[in-house]
Amino acid sequence: MGIFPEIYPGKGSPVACGSITRAGRNKSMNEKKVAFIICVNDMRAYTECKYYLDHLRVPEGYETDVISIAEAPSMTAGYNAGMLSTDAGYKVYMHQDVLIVNPDFIRDMLRVFAAD
C-alpha cells in the first residue's frame, strides 16, 4: 500500500463522524446518488456496518455508493479521498463502528434537505 489511502468504490462500510453533506449545484454532481464514505481499520466492525447499509431502502430513482477507505494517513485524508472519488450529490461520512439501523435513513435524510 502506498502513502495515499486505498479507495474501494462499491464496497460497504460503517459510519464514523456521522457528518452528512449535500453538494452544491455543481453540474457534475449526481443529485440522485448517496455515497457512504467510511474510514476502515477494523474489518469485523466494517462488516457489521456494511450489513446495515446493504439493508437500507433506497428511494426509487436513487442509487447508493459505498466507499471504504483503508490505511489513510488520517481520518480527514481518508474522507477527502472518498469525497473526490464520487460524483454523489449526497455524502455520508462514517466510521466503521457506526450502524445505521433505520432502514428509511435515506428517505428521511432527503426530507431534511428538501425542507431546507
Image (cartoon, rainbow, N blue to C red):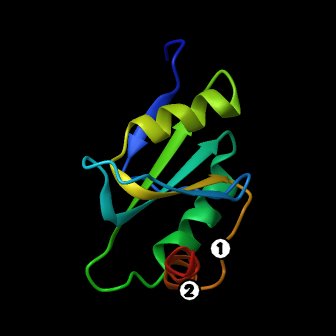
In the image, which disc is placed on residue 100? 1
Looking at this view, is 57 or 42 the one in front? Answer: 57
Residue 70 can be seen in this image: no
Residue at x 61%, y 27% (from the top left corner): 77
Residue 30 lies, in percent from the top left, at 29, 58
Answer with left or right where residue 48 lies relative to residue 8: right
**37 versus 7 height, above or below:** below
Q: What is the crowding at mark 1: few (fewer than 14 residues within 10 Å), some, or many (at least 20)?
A: some
Residue at x 58%, y 33% (from the top left corner): 78
Mark 2 and 1 residues: CB-CB less than 8 Å, in contact?
A: no
Residue at disc 2, secondary structure: loop
Q: Examine the image and state in which quarter residue 115 appears.
A: bottom right
Residue at disc 1, secondary structure: loop
In the image, which disc is placed on residue 37? none
Provide the residue designation for mark 2.
103
Residue 59 can be seen in this image: yes
**104 versus 34 height, above or below:** below
Residue 43 lies, in percent from the top left, at 63, 48
Considering every residue shown, the one lying at the far top of the view is 3
Residue 57 lies, in percent from the top left, at 45, 85
Looking at this view, is 18 or 43 the one in front? Answer: 18
Which amino acid type is marked by label 2? Pro
Residue at x 49%, y 17% (from the top left corner): 1
